[in-house]
Amino acid sequence: MDNWLKICIVVVFAVATTGNEEATPAKLLFSKQILNKYLVEGMDIVIKYSLFNVGGTAALDVQVADNTFGPQDFEVVGGQLKVTIDRIPPGSNATHVVVIRPSKYGYFNFTAAEVTYLPSEDAAEALVGLSSEPGQGAIVPFKEYDRKFSPHMLDWLSFAVMSMPSLVLPYALWYSSKTKYEAIMTQKKDK
């Protein structure tokens, strides 16, 4: 009987303390990642934006904007650099992917993207946040990338053509002497 009384008191105390909590406003963690291993002029670069809501309420009217990639240096191939997400529930995430293509090579500073959102339904003022910064990246010229990573089929074909005489000539001499030797051996056996 004494154990039942202790259990009931603990349950009542636990229920009473959990009901007094107020929901914390939405808080977004925002990251920006470049998914490519090599950044090459004229080839696609994939950029992933991840938003995580670690608050207790939904984040509303979430707007992501990335002004890093100007039209004179980059072409947007897929996705959008300015996106609006209606709501991100508490404890969940949202991702967005953009594919861009650089038109120039050289060093480029990949800066942070910006997010604005309402932390709760009754919030009047939007919060502004910045993503993680990938930092500076080197965009290599396509010729350099191609020289390093292409299969070099023309090079291998020219190597095969140039090495043929050094392989075919000894084989022809060996085959010629072999057939002469076999002809002599068959003549000796016939006698």
Image (spheres, grey):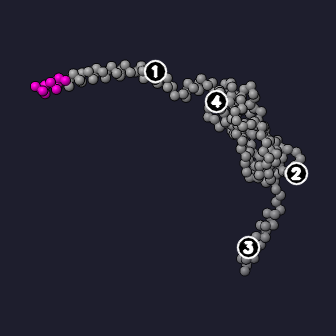
Work out which quarter of the rendered image holds the N terminus and state it: bottom right
Residue at which label 1 appears: 158
> Which label's residue is closer to the chain start, 2 or 3?
3
Residue at image x 85%, y 51%? 121
Viewer-side label of 2, 1: 1
Q: Amino acid at mark 4?
A: Met
Viewer-side label of 1, 3: 1
Residue at which label 3 appears: 7
Which label number is shown at residue 43? Answer: 4
| Residue 185 on the magenta segment | yes
* Residues tagged 1 and 3 counted as in contact (Cβ below 8 A): no
Residue 129 horizontal/vertical position (percent): 79, 41
Asked whether, in this view, residue 164 is left or right of residue 22, the answer is: left
> Which label's residue is closer to the chain start, 4 or 2?
4
* Secondary structure state at the residue bearing disc 2: loop
* Residues tagged 3 and 4 counted as in contact (Cβ below 8 A): no
Q: Amino acid at mark 1?
A: Ser
Q: Residues within 10 Å of mark 2 (few under 14, many from 20)?
A: few
> Which label's residue is closer to the chain start, 4 or 1?
4
Q: Residues within 10 Å of mark 1 (few under 14, many from 20)?
A: few
Residue 182 horizontal/vertical position (percent): 20, 25
Q: Determine the CA span between mark 4 and mark 1.
A: 28 Å
